[in-house]
Image (spheres, helix red, strand yellow):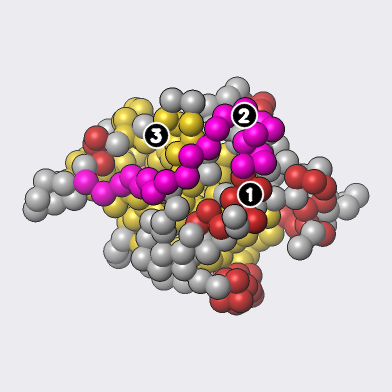
Amino acid sequence: MAPARAHLLAFLSVLTTMEVALSSLAAGGGRMTDQLDILWGPTQLLNGSNGDDQTIGLSLDRVMGSGFRFKTSYLFARIDIDIKLVPGNSAGTVTTVYLMSEKQWKTHDEIDLEFLGNLTGQPYTLHTNIFANGSGGREVQYRLWFDPTLDFHTYSIIWNSDEILILVDNKAIRRFRNHWDAGVPFPVYQPMRLNGVLWDADDWTTQGGRVKTDWSQAPFIAYFRNYRANGCEPSGFVWVCGQQGAAPGGGDWFDGGAAGLDDMKQQEQLREAQDRYMIYNYCTDSKRFPGGFPTECGLA
């Protein structure tokens, strides 16, 4: 048995007392409206030629934003979704996809990908954050190296018992390892499901809130399609876990072959993202942490 899967079984036996069955289980494709609930706000629905290839448009105007939530929760998963972001002057807007547990806020788990709107011609910022047992503040930001408004791009969250990996077009940009044994919180026992929201946050989003939302450009619309999920979901008293890659590139997300890449290639991609595209890392913010950085910042 591979180390990651053995690690998972140990966690589940201690934390959930549930039996785990390993089998191939994947969700996604087909009609997105069958897989999600619209939570609030105005949305658009675009059907493909066969009626199954659906695209959901979230809309934001001065009155309200909009949001959806997928119906299935997972305890560890690979999630992929294609997004086409708000074009033009999107300053002040935030397009967000995030995994979140349903426990009360002070003990919740969450993995965030937030796309911060920009002025026309400026690059989008991808703001990532991770909460575990209610503790967050692990922000890392990147400038996207392409225009995410011209076409759909794939954004992925891989979450297993060893690590969280965030990918853009199957390219690894951020890794957060499980250092539970060093006292660092990590999401290991609360199931989470994917949410999508388009909202206004012009008090902080663009240039620290200096650039406000231009409501004459409303409605702002971001599009989502091709949701894929491969993970562990409840089936009675058993958690059934998919083992196959859920996106081009394959790889066993459960055991660390997260993006169909060997570890050396992943390390190369992570270094490139850090050197070329990262613009903020909480682990180097000495003004924020004058008394010393969080524990995980000094761990490999």
Residue 91 visible in the current orientation: no
**Location of residue 260 in the rendering, given as x and y in whole percent from the top left corner:** 47, 68
User: Given this view, does label 3 or label 1 mark the residue nearer the observer?
Assistant: 1
Q: Residues within 10 Å of mark 1 (few under 14, many from 20)?
A: few
- In the picture, the disc for residue 72 is 3
Pointer 2: what residue?
A: 16
Secondary-structure class at tag 3: loop
Pointer 1: what residue?
A: 6
Secondary-structure class at tag 2: loop
**Location of residue 73 in the rendering, given as x and y in whole percent from the top left corner:** 45, 34
**Location of residue 181 in the rendering, given as x and y in whole percent from the top left corner:** 80, 46
| Residue found at the far top of this picture | 104
Q: Residue at x 48, y 60 (%)?
A: 252
User: Given this view, does label 3 or label 2 mark the residue nearer the observer?
Assistant: 2
Name the residue type under label 2.
Thr
Name the residue type under label 3.
Thr
Q: Residue at x 77, y 53 (%)?
A: 296
Mark 2 or mark 3, which is nearer the start of the sequence?
Answer: 2
Q: Residue at x 52, y 64 (%)?
A: 257
Specify whether residue 293 is painted magenta: no
- Where on the picture, by quarter, is residue 284? bottom right
Specify whether residue 18 is painted magenta: yes
Q: Is residue 251 left or right of residue 149?
A: right
